[in-house]
Image (cartoon, grey):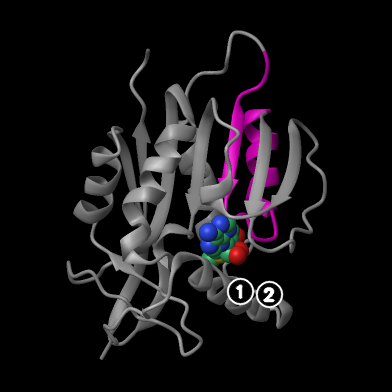
Amino acid sequence: MPRTAEPAVGYTAYRRVVADSFGTWYGRRRDSWTGTDTNEAVTRFVCAEAPAPRAEGRRRILDVGCGRGRQTTALAERLDADTTGLDLLDVWDAPPPTRGQVRFRQGDFLDFTDDNLDIVVDNGCLHHQRRADWPAWAAHGARLLRPGGVLAVSVFLSPDGAISELPLDDGRLNWWLPEETVTDLYTRAGLTATGRQVIDRDFQYQGHWLSYLALSFRKAEG
Ligand SMILES: C[S@@+](CC[C@H](N)C(=O)[O-])C[C@H]1O[C@@H](n2cnc3c(N)ncnc32)[C@H](O)[C@@H]1O
């Protein structure tokens, strides 16, 4: 059965837990999520939901929790965008884009302040955060968007409608989330739900076939 007790640590301490955990997984090449078909599906979803290009200059994208940066680069190329990949770890190793522009920054999402973004992408990051931090996480993403900008988030979809925590032994949380929970978070942050896609992971755990859920939200114009 999934464990349910959230570790009693503050945001900074938990951020270290997350960085150490992912550092170990990348170091051992256990980042099975990198470069997958499911990530390609999320990339296509983001491109389909993207706001129209600016009258002047490239669209500006933030890829939150970019990991190795493959998706950051794919988004820069496909949308001819000026894209920033942000991660707690400096593990990015994606080749430079053939179109658009990419820069990588090491740091925590809640410390990132470069706003006026056309698109914020969160592919697999929210569902590793402490539940207490979800509202601030969603509000921060909404704040970074320009009016008319789009936030796309992809999470582990709860197979049974429950919010399940599933922590790893090292303390990193893996939330399985129902659609209403995620939608509620971002609509409370002032955004409007605009799109959804369920992405099959072809992966079974504890008797459930698991999927990702990609959702998009738009910030009101003006
Ligand atoms: C499951 S991986 C997904 C990586 C990438 N988006 C992809 O799909 O290939 C989650 C990533 O989020 C990063 N991360 C977790 N919490 C973060 C935070 N608070 N700020 C920035 N990055 C974070 C981790 O270091 C990790 O690389």
Whether residue 201 is visible:
yes
Amino acid type for the residue under numbered disc 1: Phe
Image coords of residue 139 (percent x, y): 37, 42
Question: What residue is shown with label 1?
Answer: 22
Residue at the spot x=52%, y=27% of the render?
A: 118
Image quarter in which the C terminus is found: top left
- Is residue 94 toward the left or the right of residue 120 in the image? right
Alpha carbons under labels 2 and 1: distance apart: 6 Å
Does label 1 point to a residue whose CB lies under 8 Å from ligand 1? yes
Image quarter in which the N terminus is found: bottom left
Does label 2 point to a residue whose CB lies under 8 Å from ligand 1? yes
Queried whether the magenta region covers residue 68, the answer comes back as yes
Q: Find residue 168 and report its image quarter.
A: bottom left
Image coords of residue 70 (percent x, y): 68, 53
Question: What residue is shown with label 2?
Answer: 26
- Is residue 16 toward the left or the right of residue 51 in the image? right
Closer-to-camera residue (203/127) = 127
Whether residue 30 is visible:
no
Please provide the residue range marked out in magenta.
57-80
Residue at the spot x=40%, y=36% of the render?
A: 142
